[in-house]
Amino acid sequence: MTAALAAAHRGLRTVLIEKAATFGGSTARSGGGVWIPNNSALRAAGVPDSPEQAAAYLDHIVGDVVPAERRKAFLDNGPAVVDFVLANTPLDLAWVPDYADYYPEAPGGLPGGRSVEPKPLDARLLGADRADLTPPYLKAPTGMAITQADYRWMNLMARHPRGLLRAGRVAGRRALSLLRRREMLTMGQALTAGLRVGLTRAGVEVRLSTPMLDLSTADGRVLGVVTEGGILEARLGVVVTSGGFERNERMRKEYQREPITADWTVGAPENTGDGIEAGLRLGAAVELMDDAWWGPSIELPRGPYFCLAERTLPGCVMVNQAGERFVNEASPYVDAVHAMYDGHTDDKPHIPAWLILDQRYRNRYVFAGLGPRQPLPGRWFKSGAVYKASTLADLANRIDVPADALVSTVERFNGFARSGRDEDFHRGESAYDRYYGDPRVKPNPCLGELGKPPFYAVRIVPGDLGTKGGLRTDTRARVLRGDGTHIPGLYAAGNASAAVMGHTYAGPGATLGPAMVFGYLAAQDIATQASVQQSYK
């Protein structure tokens, strides 16, 4: 949508086609955070940042996995993209306070974070298009409009005054919207809705239920898109923004490490790699196909649940099938799953892993959308997603983990909780770890003893928000062949292209931020080339 909006504002006749019957895809299902350093919303909030800091940060965490000039293109153009979107849509963005960069202690990292999110948006702005907005991944209770900033504190509503205050604010917002007969959209729904309104105002046609079957070419140049209704001609270029291949079982088996399945992702069901495969048929190169925007996830009967705060809060540990910890549970979700795969062997499986917690944890914290003290549904136990026992040894037997090893692991962890220092994995030492911690737990908000029965074991699999491998692109989002030449008329952005973040994840919104920037750059390049062609006529 950013690409289409930018093209339209450069005077190009633009059409956006969408495979699904609704618009928004994985973005509408997401938290809607946008990670773009030095943008105007950050400056308005007084967040200290600089181009040099942001460049040092990406240089350190991404390294030479991604060409330096491509990282630079993202950082140099990002602020202008944010200003463009704010000027041409009803969106307003706000800093998410203290949602740290994922590696805030790295050179250039910010403990206070660079993530911005949409402010609540009135759904009436969409008009009839409201019916076509993709539903969120998880619906808030009773239709409440919850932002990312709200989510952090509402997890602690049974533990911290700010949690109760935030819950009251959200309830008040809901009451006001009911009084005014308004529906307020937040997170990814607000982001996609705001962009959709911008497209309507710019006169961009959006065609839903229009899957791309292939790319149309002539003399080596992409000139359109093949659909079920025929060929849509695009004389100046096609921008592929069709998402990753997370829902394509064959591609996941071909490119990624076992064990893997398309059933563990929370990405949009339509993301089956269509755009990537169309590019491959034209000789495009691909990169990072083994990787994804991973996150430890719970296989619930209704589908996978992507864990954010759950594994960070005090009173839980994550262990492998040997009953041993193997990672800082509070680490960035990509790193946690990399540790699962890197340590996984036939002799010592890490997949599935187990999140072990006690009743004190359940009494205090929200878990997988359920409130403190709320009983876990019986179907969770029946499906094998969760096990429960009165002792750790009995729990270990139920999940086929050595009992002595699990008991020893928990005893050692409890010692770390008492001292406030995780000597094995340093949980709670990073500002990122502490974001979802419990400030009332001292001296470390991420460490708490497991001691109050019953005990629970939650089955953890390597889920994801989407794949991050895709078509290789340059600084202008042009799709490249293996020899470095570009395929004329073909561009890609978002998860259809190889991520500018490489194998890492800079911070909340580091998927959506680059997607918007490179979509914008693709449109700018197409418009510039069109102007050049016109000048020769």
Image (cartoon, rainbow, N blue to C red):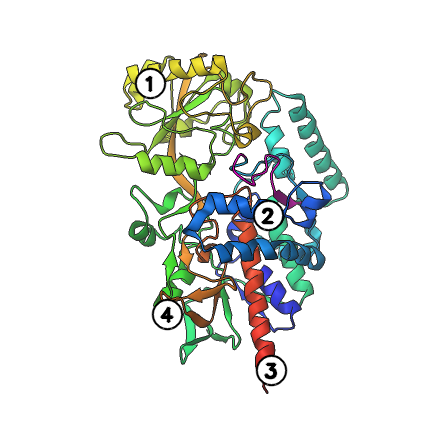
Q: Could you tell me if the residues under marks 4 and 2 are in contact, i.e. CB atoms within 8 Å?
A: no
Is residue 384 shown to the viewer in this render?
A: no
Q: Could you tell me if the residues under marks 2 and 3 are in contact, i.e. CB atoms within 8 Å?
A: no
Quadrant for the C terminus in the image: bottom right
Q: Which amino acid does label 1 sit on?
A: Leu
Q: Distance between the residues labelled 3 and 4?
A: 27 Å
Q: What residue type is labelled 4?
A: Leu
Q: Which numbered dot is residue 52?
A: 2
Which of pointers 1 and 4 lies earlier in the amino acid sequence?
4
Secondary structure category for the residue under label 4: loop
Query: Which residue lies under the disc numbered 1?
Result: 406
Secondary structure category for the residue under label 1: helix
Q: Distance between the residues labelled 2 and 3?
A: 38 Å
Q: Could you tell me if the residues under marks 3 and 4 are in contact, i.e. CB atoms within 8 Å?
A: no
Q: Which numbered dot is residue 282?
A: 4
Q: How far apart are marks 1 and 4 (CA)?
A: 52 Å
Looking at the image, residue 292 lies above or below residue 21: above
Percent x, y for residue 73?
A: 55, 58
Q: Distance between the residues labelled 1 and 3?
A: 71 Å
Which of pointers 2 and 3 lies earlier in the amino acid sequence?
2
Q: Quadrant of residue 335?
A: top left
Which of pointers 3 and 4 lies earlier in the amino acid sequence?
4
Image check: 86 left or right of 457?
right
Give the residues in magenta.
105-118
Which of pointers 1 and 3 lies earlier in the amino acid sequence?
1
Q: Which of marks 4 and 2 is in front?
A: 2
Q: Distance between the residues labelled 2 and 1?
A: 46 Å
Which of pointers 4 and 2 lies earlier in the amino acid sequence?
2
Whether the magenta-drawn stretch holds residue 226 is answered as no
Q: Which amino acid does label 2 sit on?
A: Glu
Per the picture, the main secondary structure of the magenta-coloured stretch is: loop
Q: Which residue is rendered at x = 61% and y = 42% of the image?
A: 114
